[in-house]
Image (cartoon, rainbow, N blue to C red):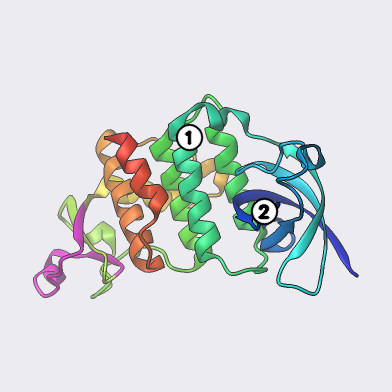
């Protein structure tokens, strides 16, 4: 039977029967995969407590006849240990993991998504963690990779550039997927709308256009932080068609 090895971040683990675990990984070379760890609950020593969410592992698997590859070996690369000491970090990491595990197709290889997840986990594992800013970065970059991203450069109806829109507060229409100029606003009145300052739009476009290392250097005002996060969380939930349980928990602990 064929074997494969790859590095992967454990997104989720599910109890399967009395002794086994189903593990969902985002891997560098295979994309998102589901594997079975047989007898993982019965034998404590076999995987030495490293089958935990957000752990980055080197894994070796055997491709079997069933629905799941079988996990044979796992070696720890990075536990991102500080995440487990802070409920806010756990909540954000859980939110990102839920987005990936529920909305990325199996075995759709995407090394950029793997690098993105490891980048944001590394940031929140460090002392430079600013929760809202790094979640904005993750959501914007994820939406770009997923192929549906808020249209902020121009009015989504008439196409006038954002620079030519005179108002400092610009309406964003969730169902239209982009900003509206004042003229088009009169003809597009819907329920899922919000307003963004030009400063917020400028910062989001910087993140959209920059690589990871440059993008996480952008500084937000408190107003821009809240506008950006509300936009991206709303947009992500609407276009991915899901109410994320982890996001509800995140909002609960943030109150």
Secondary element under disc 2, as helix, strand or loop, is loop
**Above or below — where is 59 with respect to 190?**
above
Which residue is tagged 2? 18
Can the viewer see residue 208?
Answer: no
Residue 89 — which label? Answer: 1
Residue 250: quadrant of the picture: top left
Percent coordinates x, y for residue 162 in the rendering: 27, 60
Secondary element under disc 1, as helix, strand or loop, is helix
Where is the C terminus found, in terms of image quarters? top left
Q: Nearer the viewer, mark 2 or mark 1?
A: 2
Residue 236 — which label? Answer: none
**Above or below — where is 196 with respect to 103?**
above
Q: Which residues are magenta?
A: 177-195
Where is the N terminus found, in terms of image quarters? bottom right
Q: Is residue 59 left or right of residue 32?
A: right
Q: Residue at the spot x=33%, y=60% of the render?
A: 235
User: How far separated are the C-alphas under marks 2 and 1?
Assistant: 31 Å
Residue 171: quadrant of the picture: bottom left
Percent coordinates x, y for residue 16 in the rendering: 64, 58
Q: Is residue 118 left or right of residue 19?
A: left
Q: Residue at the spot x=17%, y=51% of the render?
A: 169
Q: Residue at the spot x=38%, y=60% of the render?
A: 236
Q: Is residue 184 magenta?
A: yes
């Amino acid at each position: 039977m064929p074997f494969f090895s790859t590095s992967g971040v454990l997104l989720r683990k599910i109890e399967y029967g009395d002794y086994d675990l189903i593990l969902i990984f985002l891997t560098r070379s295979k994309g998102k995969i589901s594997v079975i760890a047989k007898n993982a609950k019965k034998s404590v020593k076999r995987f030495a407590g490293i089958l935990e969410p957000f752990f980055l592992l080197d894994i070796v698997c055997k491709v079997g006849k069933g629905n799941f590859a079988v996990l044979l070996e796992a070696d720890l690369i990075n536990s991102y240990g500080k995440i487990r000491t802070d409920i806010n970090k756990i909540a954000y990491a859980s939110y990102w993991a839920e987005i990936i595990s529920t909305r990325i197709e199996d075995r759709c290889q995407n090394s950029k998504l793997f690098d993105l997840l490891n980048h944001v986990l590394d940031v929140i594992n460090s002392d430079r963690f600013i929760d809202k800013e790094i979640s904005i970065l993750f959501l914007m970059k994820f939406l770009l990779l997923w192929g549906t991203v808020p249209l902020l450069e121009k009015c989504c109806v008439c196409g006038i550039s954002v620079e030519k829109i005179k108002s400092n507060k610009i309406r964003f229409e969730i169902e239209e997927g982009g900003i509206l100029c004042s003229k088009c606003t009169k003809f597009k009145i819907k329920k899922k709308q919000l307003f963004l300052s030009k400063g917020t739009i400028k910062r989001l476009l910087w993140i959209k256009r920059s690589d990871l290392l440059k993008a996480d250097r952008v500084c937000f005002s408190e107003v821009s932080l809240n506008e950006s996060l509300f936009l991206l969380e709303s947009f992500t939930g609407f276009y991915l068609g899901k109410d994320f349980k982890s996001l509800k928990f995140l909002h609960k602990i943030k109150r």
